[in-house]
Amino acid sequence: MTAVSLKTAVMLMDESRGSSIPGVNLPAGNEPMEGLSEEPGDDLSGGQKEVLERCLHALTHAKNDSQTLAALLLITRVCPASQLDQVTLRRVFEAVGLNLPARLLVTAIRGDSGSGLPAQELLSLGTALLAALSTDPEMAQHPQMLSTLPMLLGLLSDGPTWTPQKQRTPQTSQQEESGVSAGRCNGTHSDVPQSQPSPSEGAGEESGSQTSPNSAVKLNEALASDCYQVLEAVSVVLGGQERLLTRGAVPALCRAIEQSQTLCSQRGRPLLGLLLSRLGQQAWERHSAQLRGVLEGLSREFCQAKEQQRLELCSELLQFLPPQEGVLESGELRRLVGELWAAVRPLVQSKMSPTQLGPVLVLSACLLDLCGWDCVGPPRFCCLLVNRACVEVRMGLEEPPGTDMTPDLQHCLTACYRIMEAAMEQACNQGPDDSTTQPQTSFAGLSLQQSKQVLGVLEEAFSAIIYYLQQRVDQSLHGNPFVFVTFRCLCAWLAEETSCLKEQVTSLLPFLIGYSRDHLQGGGDLRDLSNWMADMSIAPGSSKDKWTGEHALRYLLPALCHLTAEEEPRKALLSLDTLSLLIGFLSKGWERLQKQEGKAQKRDPALETACSALLNITITEPERVRKDPSFSDLQKLLNEALPLLLHKPRLLVLAANFCTLGLMMGRMKAPPSDLTDPGERRFFSAALRFQLSALSSAQGSLPGPVVAAWEEGWEEVGELWRLSVQALGACFRSRPALTALVREQSWLTNTLAALRTRSARADAPTLEALQEALCALAQMCPACRDEIREELKKGQASCLKDMSQLRRTVSQ
């Protein structure tokens, strides 16, 4: 709505009522004043400027509403709005203010007859003034403009007969009336009664949910257009969408759509879609019932539409899907998604151009996010969907360098990436594992030939991704959001599959490490990446993590865990100084955990994955452990962190990683003859206590000698614990002075006591690890050997009697 609507509304009032406004004597008719031109686009003549200045003076010095309206009418007759510059329009806006249109609406809604004008005309004039004022961004976010939103929303949802249902107290009414009058620019009295419905943030929400007995009455199109203009203007200013949400815009727009109110399809549905695309999670949590009704209606429209209409509805429909976190019952959501898939399948199966196919694939990706493959369809269709996504990726990424990629194509490829990731996730979840709560899906019924076909097209698509990143992306594009989602998709594949395309992946490692390091360092054009990612999300309304420079490395870490276990990729990674990258990430993560002291510290799996990658390097590259200064930095970190982690049960897995990593490093480094370094002594002391804390002095329920506190995480921590015990045995041999610390902390005594009380047979891997450590201790420490020998002689050590190697060692 432009200021032309302001002119039209005022002149319409004059046509129907003449000069019946109290105190106003206006010339009849709509002819412009003599000698003044109204041709749009003409510059103002000298005469027009002179008259306009007089009108503006009259408007600024108006003593009541009647004089204000008369001055407005004269201005519209002097020249059309298209001939007024922004400065002049601003002067008009400042003179009129927001209080006048607000009181016009209040008068119309209350049905007061003191103005001498019909309610419909008051509504038309009030909304037209608000619409014109809202074209100025400062006015659009003014508190008085925001106070009118519940009224405008009520009009749009229930028509011109809407009235507020909320019962107001006298105190509330007085506050609301004073709030309206405070916006009067000239500060003079008014001929319109100063009272209004509650502008509180809850009023609009309530109005949108109440049933009006006259809901069939609809606004005329001009009035509805003015109301939507105000809402749209508010939605584009900073924080405007949040203000609309808190003032009940979602239920009001839902009701307008349900009632088929004026312009609800052309203006209401797009506005609601915009709010959901930005604030979907909050909106669904507050108004799931109303939004479910809109989604049901839009889904029916989509399913019943012809193919071309469905293509047009794809982009709109995905805005109304609920967030991934789920606010609908599982059965209800699956039914709805299943119906949508039934309508989407013919689109995927038909021949269409890439431009037409793009929105279909984006909608398909969103549906996959909601319910996985369970509702997609038969295996043959699942293969087709994956195939079409992979073909689009190849076609989009294998263009020669220098080819521009349109935003629509980027959006389509982002959706294709999600379909590919979902296919990989499904492939990894295949198998007879009955422990999962998810039922076996249709995708699980692929034949061997179909599985090979799917893996083949996925491999071709990821080959195209590698080509794109290697050939078309340089450092200047590291801040490009589409490059980030492409990087993320490749990392998801590398986390599961490293046996394919080995040479191509190894040759791409300089880019992957350089990209991750560049993001960690941050700055420059990387700062806007988070906002773009929110806009490009294929899961509308889903919650978005706050952007940090660590995201890229976090996605890459699972792949690094695999790649560091293989000879050629590991050598390439070490040549790229990946060690310092991993250790720096670990150090920052530990600093972040320390700042959470006193709070419920949350486990960070990425830190554990980084430890796994470092552990691979430690085991396979002993010479580097001895000589590379990066490992000295890592040891200092472990020396500081492990003693503190002993008292943090939520971080048990991280403690196991730190303990194992430190002991594996300790067995390789050439130490002094004794533990003179305080940091190292603290670490080994903490490592001994950590290992001992897993042993139980009472009968446990697990096959291994583990205390109840460890039972829940033993499946995940157990292997690390065993490896740390074996590493401790190696440390006994390389650091003889460590045996004194063992005796000082009674590690041997407590370990033997725990084994003595186990009447049931412990699991073999645990016994082997303990036996290896005990044998090493017996060989390096005569006093320890004697203590073990005495324990074996007692004959009641049920677990020790199975350690034949230990018996041979102490008998020598």
Image: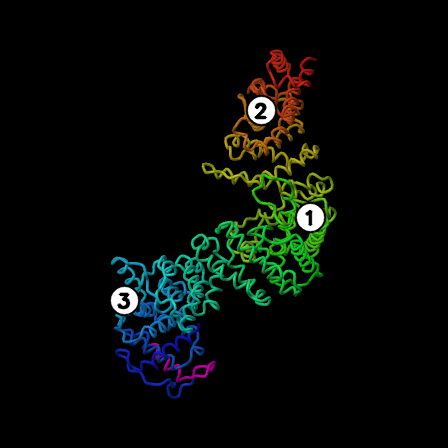
**Closer to us: mark 3 or mark 2?**
2
Circle number at residue 589: none
Q: Quadrant of residue 23?
A: bottom left
Q: Which residues are magenta?
A: 38-56
**Disc 1 + disc 2, Cβ < 8 Å:** no
Percent across and percent down for residue 10 are 36, 77
Residue placed farthest to the bottom in the image? 34
Identify the mark nearer the N-term, 1 or 2. Answer: 1
State how far apart marks 1 and 2 are (Cα).
45 Å
Q: Quadrant of the C terminus?
A: top right
Return the residue at label 2: 705
Identify the mark nearer the N-term, 3 or 2. Answer: 3
Locate residue 16 relative to residue 231 in the image: left or right: left
* Number of residues whose C-alpha sits closer than 10 Å to that of mark 2, classed few (under 14), some (14–19) or many (20 or more): many
**Which amino acid is tagged 2?**
Pro
- What count of labels does the image hold? 3
State how far apart marks 3 and 1 are (Cα).
70 Å
Q: Quadrant of residue 666?
A: top right
User: What colour scheme was applied to this rendering of the protein?
Assistant: rainbow
Q: For this rendering, which residue is in front, 324 or 135? A: 324
- Residue 533 in sight: no
| Element assignment for label 1 | helix
Percent across and percent down for residue 743 are 58, 18
**Closer to us: mark 3 or mark 1?**
3
Return the residue at label 3: 194
In this rendering, is residue 529 above or below 56? above
Q: Quadrant of the N terminus?
A: bottom left
In this rendering, is residue 79 above or below 135? below
Circle number at residue 510: 1
